[in-house]
Image (tube, rainbow, N blue to C red):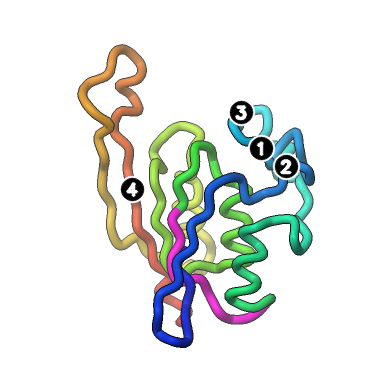
Amino acid sequence: LLMPSTDRRTKVMLLFGTPYPYELCNSTCGRQTGSYWTHIDVEACFRCPDPERNQSALRNICESMLGKGGRRRLDFAILDVAQPGIEEWYLMETYCRPRYVFLMNGNMPLHQGWVADRLLNARGSTWRELLFGEISWGHKFKDMMDLVRISNWRFFADLGET
């Protein structure tokens, strides 16, 4: 997370782990360390409650740095998760409101490619894709693994709101 700063120094925070509290929705959105999202979780995930203050590190960081309900925005966010990132993006969109977003692995099955569609295709969207690229994860893999050997990255900017 790249945070705006009034003293012109860049503030960067790196978060590792699940931003949505496992205890709040233990069978769906929140995942215990070392567990992974499955296709069965999607419907129930959208029913998880909004985390309260002090239940989500990501919410707390964004509210403390940007102000609760204010007009300030996060400058830059990188979304690189090994699942669709439903909870992560919900918290980003609701509490952090980034100006620039870097998405990794959006072309991978069950990853966060849907976030790009949400940014670009919402009615009246001012988001634009600025850059796109690919990353090859090594040499040709054997069998089906070769389908996911090439991953993409995408860089977006919200050009409408200053």
The numbered dot on residue 22 is: 2
Find out whether residue 75 is within the magenta segment: yes
Q: Are marks 1 and 4 in contact (CB under 8 Å)?
A: no
SS class of the residue under badge 4? strand
On the question of residue 126 being in view, the answer is no
Q: Which residue is mark 3?
A: 38
SS class of the residue under badge 3? loop
Q: Is residue 48 left or right of residue 86?
A: right
Residue range of the region highlighted in magenta in the rendering: 69-78
Q: Is residue 161 left or right of residue 45?
A: left
Q: Are marks 1 and 2 in contact (CB under 8 Å)?
A: yes
Q: Which residue is mark 4?
A: 153
SS class of the residue under badge 2? helix
- Characterize the magenta stretch by its predominant secondary structure: loop
Q: Which residue is mark 1?
A: 31
Q: CA distance from mark 3 to mark 4?
A: 23 Å
Q: Amino acid at mark 1?
A: Arg
- First in sequence: mark 2 or mark 3? 2
Q: Are marks 3 and 1 in contact (CB under 8 Å)?
A: no
Q: Quadrant of residue 40?
A: top right
- First in sequence: mark 3 or mark 1? 1
Q: Quadrant of residue 97?
A: bottom right
- First in sequence: mark 3 or mark 4? 3
Q: Amino acid at mark 2?
A: Tyr
User: Residue 1 or 95: which is nearer the viewer?
Assistant: 1
Residue 25 image offset from top left, x and y in percent: 77, 42
